[in-house]
Amino acid sequence: MCRARGRLKEKGLQLLVGDFVEVGEIVDGRGVIESVLPRRNRLTRPPVANVDLAIIVFSVKEPPLALFFLDRIVLTAEKAGLGIFICFTKTDLLKADGLDSFLGIAETYRACGYKVFFTSTKTGQGFQEIKLSLKGKVSALAGPSGVGKTSLINQLKPGLGLLSSPVSKKGKRGRQTTRDVSLIRLDRDTFIVDTPGFQRLDLEGFIPQDLADFFPEIRALGDHCRFGGCQHVAEPGCAVKEALKESKIASWRYEHYRSFLKEIKQKNVFSPKGEKK
Ligand SMILES: Nc1nc2c(ncn2[C@@H]2O[C@H](COP(=O)(O)OP(=O)(O)O)[C@@H](O)[C@H]2O)c(=O)[nH]1
Ligand SMILES: [Mg+2]
Ligand SMILES: [Zn+2]
């Protein structure tokens, strides 16, 4: 048990889950935090420091996959500079050929450089693979409630007995049971953060010119557009539009890009301080 040295608070420093700290002498199991080491990064929702990976969790069914929301979380994870894993849960709820429609989606994300997993607590599919990939990292879970984030942690660390909550029948939306942010140790150097889920992501701090940087497949084509600063909407000689026509990039990802762009532009009209200096 540690408390923070008073002068840390005086300096306005807020301790975060995930912080590395220096602790003075420990007496009777109690110590004092003397300083906080520099943070590699810092998320605001959830409030955690020094995260390596975002594990974005969505179920294939119950609740049904919401790709627009998924890409919204991918976008914020990209902005935070995190590695990205995408985990599709509850594959046991699909009929035999039900997975086919998800394979194209998985392929699209893999082409972006993200790791994609399919899991089921009923069959045990996928967990060993995830476990190996997480080793030595601090990961934060994200995703709507009811998709199986807490169940995923329970699978990765049996015996923890975290409370998962059945998806309520009414509206098939999950109830919220994960209230506090906590860092769970999976092994010596592997940690995972269970979170209340990213609920409202308001795309704060984005500017239209930079949005494409956070879409790997669009970013990769940007250099081939005729005009520098091309936003890939209606400009002539746009390599992204060309790739779309030839089905070289997924149209749904591009549509999400367009929606986010529109949203960010509208926001900047009302709060021009988001603009580039
Ligand atoms: N059929 C099935 N149900 C699952 C699976 N994973 C989680 N669930 C169920 O989905 C509900 C929500 O799970 P929970 O882990 O609490 O979701 P969270 O809100 O994202 O933490 C619970 O009733 C779980 O038992 C799975 O792989 N297959
Ligand atoms: Mg939970
Ligand atoms: Zn372009």
Image: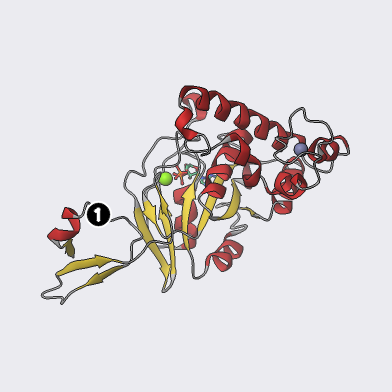
Residue 52 at x, y = what percent?
A: 49, 60
**Residue furthest front as drawn:** 277
**Residue furthest right as drawn:** 246
Query: Element at badge 1?
Result: loop
**Residue furthest left as drawn:** 28
Q: In the picture shown, does residue 112 fall above or below 25? A: above
Residue 192 at x, y = what percent?
A: 43, 59
Count of marks, rendered view: 1
Pointer 1 local density, CA inside 10 Å: few below 14, some 14–19, many at least 20:
few
Under mark 1, the amino acid is: Leu
Q: Which residue is mark 1?
A: 13
- Quick one: 189 or 165, which is closer to the camera? 189
Which residue is painted at 55% across and 52% down in the image? 121
The reply, left or right, for residue 182 in relation to residue 224 is left
**Residue 168 visible in the displayed image:** no
Which residue is painted at 15% across and 77% down in the image? 25
Q: Quadrant of residue 154?
A: bottom left
**Residue 234 visible in the displayed image:** yes
Q: In the picture shown, does residue 196 fall above or below 120? A: above
Residue 112 at x, y = what percent?
A: 70, 51
Q: Is mark 1 within 8 Å of ligand 2?
A: no
The reply, left or right, for residue 243 in relation to residue 14 is right
- Quick one: 139 or 48, which is closer to the camera? 48
Q: Quadrant of the N terminus?
A: bottom left
- Quick one: 172 or 72, which is closer to the camera? 72
Residue 269 at x, y = what percent?
A: 52, 23
